[in-house]
């Protein structure tokens, strides 16, 4: 327990951690202030006009679907000036993810129900970066300065010391992420109530938002462990930063371009960013026209999906494998 308390004090005393906290608060404040300045409480006439436009848009969607069905059945002449898909179910209003709502026709009005999830994605992205950088600098600075050696003189158990550092890091980042996300969403909820629209905050909305939040917290913890592990293997904070930059340039940009040139199928399966998006969104669907190359069938599907389960497995294997390697190397390596 004394070791964990000492590590917690060391982590909170680091200037880089304090700087990242200031940047987190600053980004939070700028986003909230910008949203508040660009929104206003809609008047009764604005609401009535938006409701009428939303109802008209839904009627147009239904009319287009009926025209498509009529032309498909041969009761409506083919109209060369109007495009309809071969499968009318694609424009069936019932099958759409969402229908037009009044908030879509209220420019300059913040709707919490419509904007909460995109805002949460922004916070998760910042927290992922925060966790990765803090995790890398936390162990990297101690390895570079000799702080780990001094700590081992007091507690000469390498695995215990490294586990305490990793556990303290993950616990602190998790607590901070939970507090930041609650304060963040609560602030925008207040903005929606006072200077915008709350929107439809039913059970489906909160369950969907909670699912994204939970998956985001897992992603933050994995990023923190990944930064910690890479810095431990490289014995320096810059090792994690260099690995991140090298992967982004060499693989996400360079390898993606090469895969496009050689006409590789399902190239997104090999990209970590695709699995991050699939995990965060509960699955992802990608288009690849090469899947139907050489196919004579009219019903060939050029889309493929990545499930959240397979994406989580990829992320766990990557973060867990590097963390295990970091512990194995740290246990045997000369630290002086």
Image (cartoon, rainbow, N blue to C red):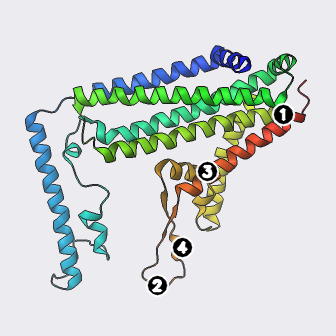
In the rendered image, the vertical position of residue 89 relative to residue 183, given as above or below: below
Please tell me how crowded label 3 is: few (under 14), some (14-19), or many (20+) other residues with Cα within 10 Å: some
Query: Residue 272's mark?
Result: 3
Q: Residue at x 80, y 34 (%)?
A: 234
Q: Residue at x 23, y 31 (%)?
A: 196
Mark 3 and mark 2: Cα distance apart in space: 32 Å
Mark 2 and mark 4: Cα distance apart in space: 12 Å
Quadrant where the image shows the C terminus:
top right
Mark 1 and mark 3: Cα distance apart in space: 26 Å
- Circle nearer the viewer, 4 or 3: 3
Pick whichever of labels 1 and 3 is earlier in the sequence: 3
Is there a contact, CB below 8 Å, between mark 4 and mark 3?
A: no
Query: Residue 297's mark?
Result: 2
Asked which secondary structure carries label 2, the reply is loop
Mark 2 and mark 1: Cα distance apart in space: 56 Å
Query: Residue 291's mark?
Result: 4
Pick whichever of labels 4 and 1 is earlier in the sequence: 4
- Circle nearer the viewer, 1 or 3: 1
Pick whichever of labels 4 and 3 is earlier in the sequence: 3
Pick whichever of labels 2 and 4 is earlier in the sequence: 4
Asked which secondary structure carries label 3, the reply is helix
User: Does any portion of residue 194 appear in the rendered image?
Assistant: yes
**Percent position (x, y) of residue 204?**
32, 48
- Circle nearer the viewer, 2 or 1: 1
Q: Is residue 186 left or right of residue 218?
A: left
Q: Nearer the viewer, residue 104 or 279?
A: 279
Q: Is residue 92 left or right of residue 128?
A: left
Pick whichever of labels 2 and 1 is earlier in the sequence: 2
**Percent position (x, y) of residue 219?**
56, 41
Q: Residue at x 63, y 16 (%)?
A: 12
């Amino acid at each position: 327990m004394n070791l964990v308390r000492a590590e917690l004090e060391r982590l909170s005393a680091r200037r880089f951690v304090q700087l990242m906290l200031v940047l987190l608060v600053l980004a939070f404040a700028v986003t909230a202030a910008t949203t508040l300045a660009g929104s206003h409480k809609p008047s009764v006439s604005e609401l009535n006009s938006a409701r009428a436009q939303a109802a008209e848009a839904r009627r147009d969607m239904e009319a287009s679907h009926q025209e498509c069905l009529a032309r498909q059945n041969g009761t409506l002449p083919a109209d060369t000036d109007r495009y309809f898909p071969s499968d009318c179910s694609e424009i069936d209003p019932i099958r759409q993810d969402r229908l037009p709502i009044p908030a879509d026709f209220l420019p300059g009005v913040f709707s919490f129900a419509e904007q909460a999830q995109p805002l949460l994605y922004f916070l998760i992205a910042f927290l992922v970066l925060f966790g990765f950088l803090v995790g890398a600098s936390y162990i990297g600075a101690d390895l570079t300065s000799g702080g780990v050696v001094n700590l081992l003189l007091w507690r000469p158990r390498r695995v215990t010391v490294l586990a305490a550092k990793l556990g303290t890091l993950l616990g602190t980042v998790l607590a901070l992420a939970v507090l930041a996300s609650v304060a963040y969403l609560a602030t925008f909820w207040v903005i929606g109530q006072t200077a915008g629209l709350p929107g439809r905050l039913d059970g489906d909305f909160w369950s969907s938002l909670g699912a994204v939040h939970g998956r985001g917290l897992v992603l933050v913890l994995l990023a923190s462990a990944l930064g910690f592990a890479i810095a431990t293997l490289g014995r320096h904070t810059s090792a994690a930063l260099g690995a991140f930059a090298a992967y982004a340039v060499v693989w996400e940009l360079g390898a993606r371009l090469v895969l496009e040139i050689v006409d590789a199928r399902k190239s997104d399966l090999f990209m970590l960013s695709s699995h991050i998006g699939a995990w965060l969104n509960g699955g992802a669907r990608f288009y690849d026209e090469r899947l139907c190359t050489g196919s004579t069938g009219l019903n060939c599907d050029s889309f493929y999906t990545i499930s959240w389960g397979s994406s989580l497995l990829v992320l766990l294997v990557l973060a867990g494998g590097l963390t295990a390697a970091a512990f194995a190397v740290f246990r045997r390596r000369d630290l002086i």
